[in-house]
Every structure is written in structure tokens, then in C-alpha cells.
Image (cartoon, rainbow, N blue to C red):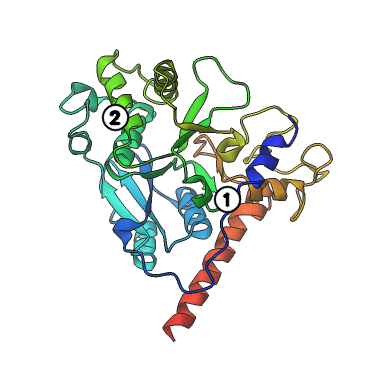
Amino acid sequence: MGMDCYDFAGTIRAPPSPPHLVPYVPPSERVHFHTYWRVDLAAFGPRQEWMLKSFFATQDLSHARLVLWSNGDLGANPILQKYERRFPDSFELRVVDIPALAKGTPMDGSGLLQSNDKKAWIDGDLVRLLVVWTYGGVWIDMDSLMTRDIAPLLEHEFVTQWDCYDKAYQPFNGALMHFRQHSPYLCEAFHIMATSQPPRQDSTDWGSLLYHKLWRRLVAGSIPPFKVLPFCFSDARACRLDNRLPDPFVADRSSGMWTMGLGMEEGGGLDRALRKVFSVHLHNQWEKEFPLDGWVDRLLLQRYDQKLKGREEEEIKQEL
């Protein structure tokens, strides 16, 4: 396997930018990116802000809009107010209303809509499906850092591979997914949810296991299924020691090496791999900090800040 997954990701290139000015796209017509934060589990702070920075630094803001869903009002949060002011057409806060989102689906009026757990797995998986069903677009987990424009992937509806091991009954991940509004795939997913046993606490019954059931049901019925993107596109930590990304929360090796003779310096092998994949999934770990001058800091976070600063300077020039 080696670096094959990274190299394959690198073959998916964005179309060239048009030479002329792009017409204004109203917010409602842009590609919606959805994410979710449980206000009762932790405050939204600087650590969570990095996901927002990664979005605004990597996506085409003339065609993309990030909707941060929550189970409580985040409007008073000063960090989020800053992004609302700066990107009024590309950022929005919404409080999730699960019964309203479920209207017209097989889950409409179901007592299962009240399901939740202390890890936000069950309700998070439910919200994920409901908002993408209602509005269409991309779902990106809050514990992710985006690394490049996702637009080249949006030709297809997809979930991602859980890891490179092909775990039995758990091959799929929804940390990054894309489905169109009122996708028949999601309608069938809701039917499975409504007619199955209630989800177990702290389980992936409405996540990975559900996607697997859905995929198997589709192929058994000779229906072309949704696509499954290779693991490294969004979760390159989930593989063998010889080809997975380094631990984001551990200081770089003193040797400066990553794997297979590839370095961790700017322009090195790790940097090139990060430029090919589309996001890095951190798997929560909110209590941990990124090491100062570690690979995440140098190759991702500092670049987000540089890109946003450059965009701000360009915005000021346009106003003059």
C-alpha cells in the first residue's frame, strides 16, 4: 500500500479557476457545509475555532457556506460573532430543531428522535443525516481540520472509509460525507432507523453501522450505492504505523522524519501528503493541545492564519 492512498487523492484536482470575475452566488444557492456542536458538553473556544479557520482558509467562499448547528444558542459567543461579521454570506449559526427536520421522513413523529448520549454520538449522527437530508451538502465533523477545497469531490454522494483495515461491520465513516437534498439514499437510511431496534448508548448504530446496513441493502437490491472515499481522504491517521499521519498531539521526532525516509519539514513528504488529502480527522481529544511548532502547527494552523490574513488584506484593498 505505501503512499498509494495519498497519491490517489492527489490525482483529484480542482478545475482551473475561470479567468473572469465569478458572478455573485446568493447564500441559499451555495454548497452548504454542515457541522454540529453540543453546547452542554463543552464551551466553544479557541480549540474549536481551528475547524472554522480551516474552512475559511481552504474552501471557495464565493460558492460555499458553513452552517454551525447546535443544541443551544451560540449567538453570544465572541469567537463566532467575529466570523458572522466577517463572512455574513458564508457563515451562519442555527439551533437544531430535530422534530421539524424530521418532517416528511420515515422518522417523522418517532419517539426515537429524542435519543442522545453523553458522547453526542447518537444525536450527532441523527442531526448529521437530518440536516443533510433537508438542505443537502457536505457534512464535516467539528473535530476535523480541512486541508484543501472539497469541490472536486462533490460530483458524487459519498461517505468515507473508516480505516485501511476494513473492519467487519464497521467499514464506513460519516465524519466527511456529501449527499444531495432529499437524497433517496438518506430516505432509505431513515426507513432503516425507524424499523430497527433503538440505538444503543454510545454506539455507532446510527453512524457507521447504519451506513453499512444501507450499503448492503442497496447492492442486494441491485441499486448502485453511494461512493466510499478511501480512508486517507479525511482520516489518514487510521492506518498502519508505516503510512499513517503522525499523532497530531505529540511533538515531532527529533530526527525530523515521518516515515519511509520522508521528512516533516515544509515542502517535505508529510507536507506533500497533506496537500493531497482533503481533511484530517482528530477524533475529538478536545482536552489535548497541538504541540508548538509541531507538524499540525507548522503545516496547517499557521497557514490557516496566513491565508485568512491575506484574504483580509485583499478585502480591505477592494473596499478602498
Q: Nearer the viewer, mark 1 or mark 2?
A: 2
The location of residue 264, given as percent across then percent down, is 75, 47
The residue beneath circle 1 is 147
Residue at the far bottom in the pictured view: 320
Residue at the location (35% across, 64% down)? 25
The CA span between labels 1 and 2 is: 31 Å
Q: Where is 148 relative to 8, above or below?
A: below
Q: Which residue is mark 2?
A: 187
Regarding residue 116, the answer to whether it shows in the image is no
Q: Position of residue 30 (x, y in %)?
A: 36, 56
Residue 77's disc number: none
Q: What is the x, y in percent for residue 69?
A: 32, 45
For residue 238, above or below residue 136: above
Q: Amino acid at mark 1?
A: Thr
Camera-side residue of 82 and 104: 104
Q: Residue furthest front?
A: 222
Indicate the secondary structure of the residue bearing disc 1.
Answer: loop
Where the N terminus falls, by quadrant? Answer: top right
In the image, farthest residue toward the left: 109
Q: Residue at x 51, y 39 (%)?
A: 287
Question: The C terminus lies in which quarter of the figure?
Answer: bottom left
Disc tally is 2
Q: Name the residue rendered at 18%, 28% in the picture.
A: 108
The answer to which image quadrant residue 214 occupies is: top left
Pick whichever, 89 or 14, lies toward us: 14
Say whether residue 228 is left or right of residue 135. Answer: right
Badge 2 crowding class, 10 Å Cα cut-off, few under 14, some 14 to 19, many 20 or more, is some
